[in-house]
Each structure stands twice: as C-alpha cells, then as structure tokens.
C-alpha cells in the first residue's frame, strides 16, 4: 500500500512538475513579447533616461545648444540628424538606436571620436577625425575681393577725339625749302552699344606742297565676356608666332582676350592641401616675407592660386592652432609667366586681305591671307602650341612647346617651323632657356633659319638671317647692387657676323639716386672692335620730378646727355621735359641738340608744345610744334567736352556741388563744375576704378552718404557715376488758420508738401510750429525712385529731373488735414547760404468743400456784400 501510494504520489508529483514547467515556458514567452512591445512603443519606460540641453563644441568650435539624452549609466546619445548641423559627416558604420521616436547615436560607439562632458557647465566637447569635418576651400585670387561692389556699366556711348597740330620746319638743307610748315588734323571715333564697340581713326595733313586725307584703322568688335573672346570685323594686326609674321589685314578674326578678366590667373599657381584638428591660422611666407594670412576651421583644407612674380621662390606654410602649436611645410616653386595654367587656351584666328602701304594709303588691300596661333596648357608644367600663316603662295607653319624643367631649373621653349613658296621650301628652329631666382637670373636663346625660309612678311624672297644667338646672366646683392653679363652673336647670309659682349652694373647711391655703368665691345665683320662705355645717373623724386645724365665714350668719339622731366598728371596740370645733348665724333662735326617739350591738361583740352633745335658746323635744324586736343563724349543722354579719351570715360556727378576734387585710385583727376559734373577720360578698362571724394572737401552743411564708387568698365565705354552729397537746410515757422475771425494754431497735425512727383510729410508741434528740411527721408526717397540701379545714366538723369533727394529752392504747395476739413498754404525754400530760415507765421486757407469754407459761403449769402450786388 505504502509503495503504491507512494508511487502514485510520486507520479502525480511528476505530472504536476511537468505541467508547471510548461506553464513557465508559456509565461516566459508572453512576458518576452510584452517586454519587446513595451521597448518599441514605450522605450523610456524601459530604461531610466533624461533629456538635457548642452552646449556642444566640435574640435574647439562652439556649435550652439542641442538636446541630447543621457541614460542611467551616464551614456550620452546625440540625435543623428544633429550631426549635420554639427558639421560632422558620420561614418557609414555608425550604429544608431531608436529612442524617443527618433534615431540616436551613442557617443561611446564612435571609437574614432574623443568626448568629454562637463556636467557642471553642461558643455559637451567632441573631437572628431578631421576627415569627417567639412572641407575648407580658400581661393587666394583677388577676383572676389576686387569685383566686390563694383558697377559694370552697359550704356550706349560714343566719343570723338580730335587733335589739331601745327608744325614749322626751318632747315639749312638745300633739298627742303626754308620756312616749310605743316597742319595736321587727327580724329578718333569710338562708339559702344552693349557688347559691340566700333573704332575708326583718320588723319588729314596739309603742307605747302600737298594735302592728304588718310584712314588708318577701322573695325567693329563683338565681346563675349563669359568666354573672354573678341570677334572682330575690319582692320586688325594678326600674329602667327615667334617664327612667323605680324601682318595687317582687313577681314574677320576671333581671339582669346584674357585682359577682359584681369583677376583670372593665366600662369600655373601653387595649391596647398592639409588638415587642422583645431581652429588655426595659416601664414604664407614667400622668400621669408609674409605674403598672406588665412584663418581656417577644423578639418581638411585646400588653399588655391598662390601666385607670385616669376622665378624660383621658397614658399613656407605655417599652420598655428589655438594652443600655439605649429606645423611648417617648405616648398620650392617656380612661377613662370610663359606657361599657361592647366586646360587654359590662348589663341587668335584671322582671315582677310593683306593691307598694303598702311600709313600712306587708306584702302589698299591685296591678297587673301590667313594667320593663326593656338596655345594650350596641357599640364601646369607643359604648354603646347601651333601656328600657321598663308598668303600669295606662301605657306608657313610651326609647332611649339614650353615646359618647366625638373628641380625648378627654369623654363625651356622649343619651336620648329617650316615654309613653302612657289620656288623653295625652308625651315627654322629655336630653343631658349630662362631662369630666375630672387637674386640670380639667366637666359639663353639660339634661333637658326635656312636660306630658303620665308614668311608672309618677308615675301617670296628668302630670309637674310642665318642665325641669332645670345646668353646673359645677372646677380643682385642688396648691399652692392646688381651685376650682369651678356654675349650675343648674329650672322646674316649677305652681311657677315656681328658679335657683342657687354657688362653692366647698377647701384642705388641713395633711395632716389641710381648709378649705372655699361661697357660693350662690338665687332662687325672684319672691322675693328668698337669699345663703348656708358655712365649714367638717374634721379627720381616722389613728387614726380626726374633727372637723367649720361656720358658715352666710343672709339668714334664721345657724347653727353642731360634730361629733366616732370611726370604728366592724370588730371589737370602740366608736365614735360627738356633734353640737351652734345655729340663729338672723330669723322664729323660736333652736334648740339636741345629738345624742350611741355603739355598742359586743362578741363576740356590738352595743350602741347614741342621744339627741336639741332646745330653743327654744316647742319642747322629747327622744328616747332604746337597742338591742342580734346574730345566730344556722350553716354546715356549726357553730353560734354573733355580731354582726349584714351580708353574709357565717365560722367561723375556730385549733387549740384561745385569745385569738389574727385580722385581716381587715389589721384586727383579734376574738380566738379558749377552743375556738380566732371568728366573723367582716363578710366582703365577691365579694372576696378575707385572714384571718390574726400569728406574734408565737402562743406559742413552737406550730408554725405556715398563718398566713393567702384566701377569696372569695358573697353571704349562711357558711363555715369553719382557721388551723393546733399546740402542741408531747413525752414521753420508757425502754421495757423482763421475761424470766425480768430487765429487757430494748427497743432499736432501732419503737413503734406508736394515736390514734383514726391510728397514730403512732416508734423507740426505745439503752437503750430513746423520744421521742414530740404531732404527727403530715406523711406520717402526709396519709394519715389523708380530705377533700382542708381549708377546708370538714366537713373541719374531721372534723379536730376526730380530734383534729386534734396528740395531745390522754390515755392511749393502744402496742405493740412484737420478735424472736419482741409486747408492749403505755400512754403518757400529760399536760395540762401543760411542753414535755417525763419518764415514766420503762415496762414493755412481752408480749401473748397471744407466745413469752414462752406460756412463762409453761407455767411456771404446772408451778408451785405450779396445784398449790395442784388
């Protein structure tokens, strides 16, 4: 029994144990599902977390305040979307978890990062790998800085330059009549509309024997600014390389014109790449001299377009972080202007008819001709090119390469050309090398021509030159001056050899005085060697005065020369020089020459005078020339007279203010006339011209809002510029109206005064006092202006027509609205030098239809005046 019962009890217990285990498995399964669901939908309830606001610094740069999460273990979680605002590019393997219905990244999972949390200040410091931070690009070219706020005009404009010259000749020769004189009229006309400009120049000459009219160059050009191209139709000079020709043709040409963008760097430059873990300062030294300084943010950086004048330069890059830790990098760089930057093109393609007797005939055109050259920057150290020309059965072509030698050992240019005409074929070749460093420079060239080599310029006859060779070297010492040596040799097929050896020395005796010594030994053919010595002194004053003296000694004799000159100002003023020389030759008489010249720039004209006196025992020659020159200019509706235009011009207006000096790039160019206008005929095209006036030159009663303007004009263009100066004045008084025969002061009402199309609003004060300035407020002026571009000629013309932003002297209607009506009166701004003018009491008369005026009409109907009329 006991065993059976015990066995039964044991079996039951076993079944019960098995059932309990099964229940536990089911319970655990449901509990796991419940925990999983709760972790997805209620994550915060699963772990103890808090949301805090911290200020985050990334690699030492404050990025602002951000929300982050912190769990009970102190682990910090940053929202994944915030990393872009922090400037961090998260690695692809960064693990994120879903918390608070968003994706967060645990900072401890970013093994490449270093973090530090200041719990007291609530500041989180993150040090990121530099490759995950934004890359900084710095362009050292001056384009963005130079063109900032510069105005590029697009006015329709033209100019007509004219010059009248009279010459008187007095010779002792028998071949020319004594007292021969000559009159000459020279014209140059240029016009521009949009991207087209047209130029033509003519010359008329008359003397005692003949008179002649001559057209020189005429052409129209279409500019393509974005492509830096000129497409020209008309007369032009075409070049086909060093071994080719320069020809004058009338036809069609297309050329690359880099001067349209003076801030584009054509030659190869130095580019840097590096990285900084902290905010740093980058100093750039060239040959030990600080050339530039840039501030960079943490991360990788690229510094591009470091440019310097030619030769080998030692460039040092110093990176200094906030803790003063420095990194130094040294480069040896060769800057070469003869190379083109990688992928840049330089070319000119021209076709037309050869022009004969240019300068003596107007319209003599002959054979059809073609001329072209093209250069390409294959790399930053290799430039390749080709050129060709053809005309009248003459064909010439060449190839060229220019490359930088290894170890910055200089630049080599190789050129090979071939030619063919109706009778022969020929060839020519040239090799040259140049090297320049801070103190030493050298050059060498050798050019060889075959006897049958021909170009368009030489015609079908073979070239006379056999070869040309030369070599030179120079060295500079800051203490002892500069030395140079040179040797050249050339040989012609018909005239033999010419050899020249030279040595020169230059030394600055003072900051303004320079000594120069040159010696030469010249041997031509079988003649004796001619030894020559030149000694010179050159003085240059900061005020523009120069003096030059030279002594020359040769085997044939000696000579002396003295010249004193004054630089010509770009504006009004005078300049000139006087040259006196004496030459004593063994085989000839002693010759004396005196040549004075003077030029005066007036407001509208340029006056010149030039005399030449030569005297010896056998020859006497006196020549006197006098002339005047000016220009008629037009731009966007403005006309005027000025000195000759040599590039581009501009009308400058200072608001009706006379005698104000105006400067261009710091040099005074003239003063405004009584209308406040000045014409500047000397703007530099494709350059930023800074036109300004000084505040000290403006009277105290004027307000100044625009002292300077920057303009970037295209070639042969006219433009308009407004420099804003307003004369401040005001009128004051009291305003009243009459009601029932009594004066009522119009207090605290608004005056509306009509000035042209504008309306000036101003309140009255206690007792009806008012104060009206002759200037519109900024908001009123801005609302009244219909032209956005204030610097266009049309905008300036509209400003002048509307009286500008100031109220000119005169009487203006005004009105006031008061309770129950409106009244009108007149305000007079007198022409006076006083800053404030007292107008006294002014009555405001009720206008028709106002209650006061209606009441007056009723009284008239009831009064005696009306009964008497009846």
Image (spheres, rainbow, N blue to C red):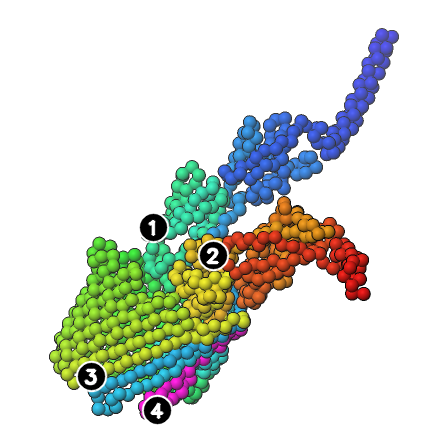
First-in-chain label (4 vs 2)? 4
From the image, which quarter does the N terminus lie in?
top right
x, y percentage for residue 413? 35, 68
Judging by the rendered image, the residue that carries numbered circle 4 is 210
In magenta stretch: residue 181: no
Going by the picture, which residue comes out furthest to the right? 1
Contact (Cβ within 8 Å) of mark 2 with mark 3: no
Q: Residue at x 42, y 37 (%)?
A: 323
- Is 55 drawn above or below residue 844 in the view shown? above
What's the magenta region? 190-215
Label 1 or label 4, whichever lies nearer to me, is: 4
* Mark before the other along the chain sequence, 2 or 3: 3
Separation of residues labelled 3 and 1 (CA atoms):
57 Å
Q: Is residue 549 left or right of residue 407?
A: left
620 relative position to 418: left or right: left
Circle 1: is it few (<14), some (14-19), or many (20+) Cα within 10 Å? few
Q: Secondary structure at mark 4?
A: loop
The percent position of residue 793, horizontal first and vertical second, equals 54, 67
Marker disc for residue 289: 1
Q: Nearest the camera: 556 or 166?
A: 166
* Contact between labelled residues 4 and 3, with CB atoms less than 8 Å apart: no
User: Which residue is label 3 attached to?
Assistant: 620
**Relative height, residue 381 to residue 762 (above, below):** below
Label 1–label 4 contact, CB within 8 A: no
Residue where numbered disc 2 is placed: 707
Is residue 734 in view from this perspective? yes
């Amino acid at each position: 029994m006991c065993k059976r019962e015990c066995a039964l009890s044991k079996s039951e217990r076993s079944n019960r144990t098995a059932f309990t285990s099964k229940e536990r498995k089911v319970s655990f399964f449901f509990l796991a599902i419940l925990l999983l669901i709760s972790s997805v939908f209620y994550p915060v309830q699963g772990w103890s977390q808090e949301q805090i606001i911290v200020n985050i610094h990334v690699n030492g740069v404050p990025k602002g305040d951000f929300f982050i999460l912190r769990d009970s273990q102190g682990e910090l979680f940053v929202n994944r979307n915030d990393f872009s605002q922090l400037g961090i590019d998260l690695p692809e393997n960064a693990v994120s978890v879903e918390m608070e219905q968003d994706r967060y990244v645990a900072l401890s999972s970013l093994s490449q990062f270093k973090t530090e949390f200041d719990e007291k200040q609530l500041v989180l410091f993150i040090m990121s790998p530099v490759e995950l931070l934004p890359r900084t690009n710095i362009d050292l070219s001056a384009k963005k800085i130079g063109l900032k706020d510069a105005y590029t005009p697009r006015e329709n404009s033209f100019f007509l330059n004219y010059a009248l010259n009279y010459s008187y000749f007095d010779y002792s020769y028998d071949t020319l009549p004594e007292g021969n004189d000559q009159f000459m009229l020279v014209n140059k006309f240029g016009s521009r509309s949009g991207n087209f400009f047209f130029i033509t120049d003519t010359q008329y000459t008359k003397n005692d024997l003949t008179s002649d009219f001559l057209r020189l160059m005429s052409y129209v050009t279409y500019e393509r600014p974005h492509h830096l191209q000129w497409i020209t139709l008309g007369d032009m000079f075409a070049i086909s390389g060093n071994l080719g020709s320069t020809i004058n043709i009338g036809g069609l040409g297309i050329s690359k014109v880099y001067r349209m963008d003076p801030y584009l760097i054509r030659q190869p430059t130095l580019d840097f790449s590096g990285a900084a873990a902290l905010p740093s300062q980058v100093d750039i030294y060239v040959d030990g001299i600080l050339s530039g300084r840039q501030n960079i943010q943490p991360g990788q950086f690229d510094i591009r377009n470091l440019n310097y004048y030619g030769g080998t330069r030692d460039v040092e890059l110093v990176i200094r972080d906030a803790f003063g830790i420095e990194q130094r990098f040294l480069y040896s760089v060769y800057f070469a202007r003869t190379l083109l930057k990688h992928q840049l093109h330089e070319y000119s393609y021209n076709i037309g008819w050869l022009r004969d007797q240019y300068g003596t005939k107007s319209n003599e055109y002959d054979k059809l001709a073609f001329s072209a050259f093209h250069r390409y920057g294959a790399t930053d150290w290799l430039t390749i090119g080709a050129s060709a020309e053809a005309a009248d059965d003459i064909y010439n072509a060449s190839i060229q390469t220019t490359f930088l030698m290894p170890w910055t050992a200089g630049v080599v240019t190789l050129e090979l050309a071939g030619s063919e005409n109706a009778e022969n074929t020929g060839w020519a070749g040239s090799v040259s090398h140049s090297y320049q460093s801070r103190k030493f420079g050298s050059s060498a060239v050798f050019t060889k021509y075959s006897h049958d080599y021909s170009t368009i310029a030489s015609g079908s006859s073979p070239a006379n030159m056999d070869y040309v060779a030369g070599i030179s070297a120079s060295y500079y010492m800051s203490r002892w001056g500069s030395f140079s040596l040179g040797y050249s040799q050339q040989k012609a097929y018909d005239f033999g050899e010419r050899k020249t050896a030279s040595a020169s020395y230059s030394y600055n005796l003072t900051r303004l005085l320079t000594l120069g010594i040159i010696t030469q030994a010249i041997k031509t053919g079988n003649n004796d060697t001619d030894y020559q010595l030149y000694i010179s002194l050159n003085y240059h004053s900061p005020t523009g005065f120069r003096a030059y003296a030279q002594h020359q000694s040769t085997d044939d004799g000696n000579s002396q020369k003295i010249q004193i000159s004054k630089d010509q100002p770009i504006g009004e003023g005078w300049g000139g020089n006087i040259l006196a020389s004496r030459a004593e030759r063994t085989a000839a008489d002693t010759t004396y020459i005196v040549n004075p010249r003077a030029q005066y720039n007036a407001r509208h004209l340029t006056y010149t005078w030039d005399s030449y006196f030569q005297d010896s025992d056998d020859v006497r020659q006196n020549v006197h020339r006098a002339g005047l020159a000016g220009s008629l200019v037009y731009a966007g509706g403005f006309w005027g007279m000025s000195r000759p235009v040599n590039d581009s011009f501009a009308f400058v207006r200072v608001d009706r203010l006379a005698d104000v000096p105006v400067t261009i790039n710091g040099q005074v160019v003239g003063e405004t006339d009584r209308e406040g206008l000045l014409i500047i005929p000397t703007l530099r095209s494709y350059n930023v011209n800074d036109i300004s006036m000084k505040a000290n030159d403006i009277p105290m009663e004027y307000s100044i809002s625009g002292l300077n303007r920057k303009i970037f004009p295209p070639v042969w263009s006219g433009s308009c510029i407004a420099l804003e100066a307003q004369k401040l004045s005001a009128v004051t008084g009291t305003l009243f109206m009459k009601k029932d025969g009594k004066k009522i002061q119009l207090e605290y009402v608004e005056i509306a005064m009509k000035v042209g199309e504008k309306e000036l609003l101003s309140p009255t004060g206690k007792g009806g006092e008012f104060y009206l300035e002759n200037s519109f407020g900024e908001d009123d002026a801005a609302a009244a202006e219909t032209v956005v571009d204030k610097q266009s000629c049309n905008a300036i013309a509209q400003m002048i027509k509307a009286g500008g932003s100031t109220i000119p002297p005169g009487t203006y209607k005004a009105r006031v609205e008061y309770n129950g009506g409106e009244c009108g009166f007149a305000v007079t701004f007198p022409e006076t030098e006083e800053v404030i003018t007292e107008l006294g009491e002014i009555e405001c008369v009720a206008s028709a239809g106002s209650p006061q005026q209606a009441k007056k009409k009723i009284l008239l109907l009831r009064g005696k005046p009306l009964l008497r009329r009846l």
